[in-house]
Image: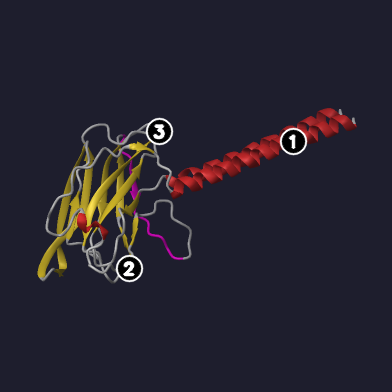
Amino acid sequence: MKAINGSLKASRLAVAGVAAASAVLVLSAPAFAHVTVQPEGAAAKGGYAVVDFKVPNERDNASTTKLEVSLPTDHPLASVMPQPVPGWTAVVTKSKLDKPLTVHGKQIDEAVTKVTWTANGKGIEPGYFQKFPLSVGQLPEDADQLVFKALQTYSNNEVVRWIETQQKGQQEPDNPAPVLELSAASGDGHGAAAKDASADGSTAPAAKDTTAQADTGGSDTTARVLGIVGIVVGAAGVAYGVLAGRRRTSAS
């Protein structure tokens, strides 16, 4: 009877260990599932930059077919040019500015407020991501970051709104908006992207097909670490349960 009770307790401990591991893996999964924006090189204040909007597909039964990115209206950008992405059509939307901008001695009374990419085919299929490059400038000199709100549409008509702003001292929201961190102003005032795309209206070369399996960026590394921790916890629980069962069996 003691042996049976010991085996039951050992089984419960093993199940608890596996459950703990599963919980850690579940918690780590969303760590790399956000729509994000990162510069190619530096995004210096007062300069120009090429930034990539990285869009992962979070669904197992639907493809991402459209991405809408709203540009900040509190710091409007006079120059915004999408780089061609194979399989996608980009549409740039401009709006009148309440306060005209002065760029290179010229006044500009309108700016790009939204860029929409629509898939011509299947779009971003499950298990893949896509990068959407934009040349932007001039970046503001009086801000440390720019917030871009994004809408991600799936082939089943589901829309995920990446529009929540991070509040200081609080946890990251469930659907955070992509945030571009700005670095200190560079000496030439054009930033690292000036060689590729500048304010003279030149267009960057066509992009290579950037659709690929999820990469190994910082967030992916975090997910892997948490996953390994979960596996270790689960294995420890199983081992402890087996040892406990053997001790009780020996004692009987």
Q: Residue 184 carries which label?
A: 2
Residues at circles 1 and 2 in contact by the CB criterion of under 8 Å: no
Q: Is the magenta stretch mostly helix, strand or loop?
A: loop
Whole-number angstrom distance, CA of label 1 to CA of label 3 = 35 Å
Residue pictured at 36% horizontal, 39% vertical? 57
Q: Residue furthest left?
A: 106
114 above or below 228? below
Secondary structure found at label 2:
loop
Residues at circles 1 and 3 in contact by the CB criterion of under 8 Å: no
Residue pictured at 22% horizontal, 57% vertical? 136
Q: Residue 226 carries which label?
A: none
Q: Where is residue 240 in the image (x, y as percent from the top left)?
A: 74, 38
Q: Which mark is residue 241?
A: 1
Q: Identity of the amino acid at label 1?
A: Gly
Specify how the rendered protein is coloured.
secondary structure
- Bounds of the magenta segment: 156-168
Secondary structure found at label 1:
helix
Whole-number angstrom distance, CA of label 2 to CA of label 3 = 41 Å
Location of the N terminus (image quadrant): top right
Residue pictured at 60% horizontal, 44% vertical? 229
- Residue 172, quarter of the rendered image: bottom left
Location of the C terminus (image quadrant): top right
Would you call the spot at circle 3 few (<14 residues within 10 Å), some (14-19), or many (20 or more)?
Answer: few
Whichever of labels 2 and 3 marks the residue nearer the N terminus, that label is 3
Would you call the spot at circle 1 few (<14 residues within 10 Å), some (14-19), or many (20 or more)?
Answer: many
Whichever of labels 1 and 2 marks the residue nearer the N terminus, that label is 2
Tag 3 residue: 60
Which of pointers 1 and 3 indicates the residue nearer the eye? 1
Whichever of labels 1 and 3 marks the residue nearer the N terminus, that label is 3
Residues at circles 2 and 3 in contact by the CB criterion of under 8 Å: no
Would you call the spot at circle 2 few (<14 residues within 10 Å), some (14-19), or many (20 or more)?
Answer: some
Q: Which residue is nearer to you in this view: 221 or 243?
A: 221
